[in-house]
Image (cartoon, rainbow, N blue to C red):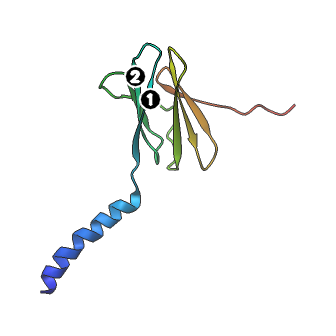
Amino acid sequence: MLKILLLTILPLFSMMTLADVGLPFSVKMVTLDSGETRHIKFNVHTGEAWWSKNTVWKKIKDSEVLSRSTYEFNVVSTGSSWRTLRIDKLTGQTWKNSRGKWVEFTHQKPD
């Protein structure tokens, strides 16, 4: 009886472990003036992101390895083009997607 109970309960504990990680992936989409769409898939914990205009994901390249954090992504259409912004919600570090690469925003130095 104990063996049956353990075999029933153990899978539930392993599912709870996965649930604690959260749901890291999400997708956003924008429509351009031409009617075409652009899609962004991203991981909110690693900051990794991919874009697609059809059905092939292309990684948006980082110049450095990002720390594990909480990232937020915004995708906007600018008429005939589009832009993705990423922010590390713990540090405030911010990037924009430019030609398939993340470009970090810098802070103006005080005078």
Q: In which quarter of the image is residue 11?
A: bottom left
Q: What residue type is labelled 1?
A: Ile
Q: Which amino acid does label 2 sit on?
A: Thr
Q: Which of marks 2 and 1 is nearer the N terminus?
A: 2
- Horizontal side of residue 46 vs 52, given as left or right: right
- Using the image, determine if residue 11 lies above or below residue 18: below
- Horizontal side of residue 52 vs 9, given as left or right: right
Tally of numbered discs = 2
Percent across and percent down for residue 110 are: 84, 34
Q: What element carries label 2?
A: strand
Question: Which label number is shown at residue 37?
Answer: 2
User: Is mark 2 in CB contact (under 8 Å) with mark 1?
Assistant: no
Mark 2 vs mark 1: in front: 2
- Horizontal side of residue 13 vs 77, given as left or right: left
Percent across and percent down for residue 63 are: 52, 31
Q: In which quarter of the image is residue 13?
A: bottom left
Looking at the image, which is closer to me, 110 or 92? 92
Q: Residue at x 49, y 20 (%)?
A: 99
Badge 2, how many Cα within 10 Å: few under 14, some, many 20+? some
- Using the image, determine if residue 9 lies above or below residue 38: below
Q: Which quadrant is home to the N terminus?
A: bottom left
Question: Which label number is shown at residue 60?
Answer: 1
Q: Which quadrant is home to the C terminus?
A: top right
Percent across and percent down for residue 5 are: 17, 81
Residue sitting at the far bottom: 1
Badge 1, how many Cα within 10 Å: few under 14, some, many 20+? some
